[in-house]
Image: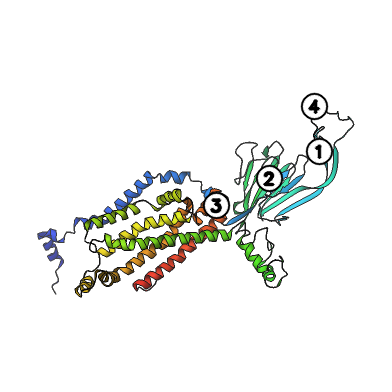
Amino acid sequence: MLVLTATEMDAIALRHPHAVRPPFWAVWRVPAMAMAIAVYVLFSWWFFGIGQVLATTNWQIAGSYLLQWVTYEYRPTIAIDKDGAIKVGYPRFDPIGPNPDPAWMSLDRGMMERRIEAPASGAAQTSGFVASPFMAPPAKPATEQPATRREEVVKRAEVRFTNEARLVVTPDRVVVDKDGETLTLSVNHDDEVKAQGPLPAWATQKRAGDRVIVAFGASGWAQIDGSSVVIHKRFFGWVNFIFDTNSAFFGKSAGEVLHLVVSGERLDPARSNLALAVDDFLHNPSWQHLDVWTKLLETIVMAFIGTLFAALVAFPLCFVAARNITRNRAANQITKRFFDFQRSVDMLIWALFFTRAFGPGPISGMAAIFFTDTGSLGKLFSEALENIDGKPREGVTSVGAAPIAVQRFGVLPQVLPVFVSQTLYFWESNTRSATIIGAMGAGGIGLKLWEAMRTHTNWPNIFYMVILIIGTVFIFDTISNALRSRLIGRPQH
């Protein structure tokens, strides 16, 4: 083995510099690629205004939306009457259920003399009698005094958000304590709120006398007006996910429900407790489990039927489009242009067209998937046919087989695994796409998801449907991968 010294290497480099000098592209390849990537990133940053978007994004609102996906609220309103009595009310569809008495709210009650408002003079009339505008109502005797009665009212309300945060409402003020800081607000019935001292960082007021918003982080927030305090007490989880407030099982523990289902007395004489529990769960008005699952099944069927019909139509047409199978240039070009026409328009556009033609519903979604995928699968199938090995065909032809037999035994065994693999992939992909086109009116869970998003209030329900969609895609992806791996003989990873 010949070993050259350093002096000999330098001498060879002097005589033949082109032999030892690295090529230009080998030296500058990495810096050029890094420079191209940097220029592309800077151009995209400027063209799409990413810096401005990040600067103007309200991350607090974004975080609040994400928090609403995994939490629920109780929204009591603490109203202060003019005579100082305090009333606590809940919205009609508040998830706390009937007869609310939450542990995080304390009410101090006491007796108070309250005025009874008498009806206006002359307001009550006998049927069929119309008072003349010239008839004055009888004058009230000067000695008549407004009627009063003594009744029990709420004089003080305390809401505990956390161990270190609470809100106390009295007839003339609202006191908020949080993390060692105290905010005192004077309220009156002119909808004017005055803060005694500067506002802490967790309280906001747009202008003097306006409402005050106090934030308690993940525990909720409160809006303080001149005559009311609206509480938004937040808890993690999905409230009433199993049973709604209208159910006979509402508020019962899992053990109590199990006891009632197995051996308890019938809550409904017409059916068993198990049937009642299943019915209450499926028809839960807050979560609508049965309707959501039905819409999800519509989406799955929409994707399956659309993909299946597309594969069935694309299969025979791809043999016409393949140049090495059909030796007719006109037939090849017409079929390929037909495929291009179908797949050149996005599935979403076809969904809008078919929705207008057939009306909203799964039929429009299936037609959009079928029309788009016929073109895509036809192109892929025909390209697979054009890349087959011609020797098996020649062998089958040499023994005098009919043209159909040539395709069956010389062509189909080579391309069938590819055809099935591509079809399975499109089926899995269309499970996702069916959700999007469903939101455009094609039905399924996509439409229900879009309807829930438009309200900007049902974020837990939206997250519930998103989880179902993701889980469905995971399942079908696993099934599709397993079938493709078994079909082409590869071990699963």
Residue situated in front as seen by the camera: 351 or 5? 351
Seen at 59% across and 52% down, the residue is: 217
Q: Choose the circle earlier in sequence order: 2 or 4.
A: 4
Q: Choose the circle earlier in sequence order: 1 or 4.
A: 1
- Cα–Cα span, label 1 and label 4: 25 Å
Q: In the displayed orientation, state which residue is furthest to the right.
A: 143
Residue 181 visible somewhere in the drawing: no
Q: Nearer the viewer, mark 3 or mark 1?
A: 3
**Label 4, on which residue?**
132
Seen at 55% across and 49% down, the residue is: 456
**Label 1, on which residue?**
117
Q: Amino acid at mark 4?
A: Ser
- Cα–Cα span, label 3 and label 2: 28 Å
Q: Nearer the viewer, mark 2 or mark 1?
A: 1
Q: Residues within 10 Å of mark 1 (few under 14, many from 20)?
A: few
Q: Is residue 65 left or right of residue 432?
A: right
Q: Choose the circle earlier in sequence order: 3 or 2.
A: 2
Q: Quadrant of the C terminus?
A: bottom left
Residue 212 position within the rendered picture, expressed as x and y whole percent measured from the top left: 64, 42
- Cα–Cα span, label 3 and label 1: 44 Å
Question: Could you say whether the residue bearing mark 3 is in a helix, strand or loop?
Answer: helix
- Cα–Cα span, label 2 and label 4: 45 Å
Residue situated in front as seen by the camera: 102 or 460? 460
Q: Which mark is residue 452?
A: 3
Question: Could you say whether the residue bearing mark 1 is in a helix, strand or loop?
Answer: loop
Q: Nearer the viewer, mark 1 or mark 4?
A: 4
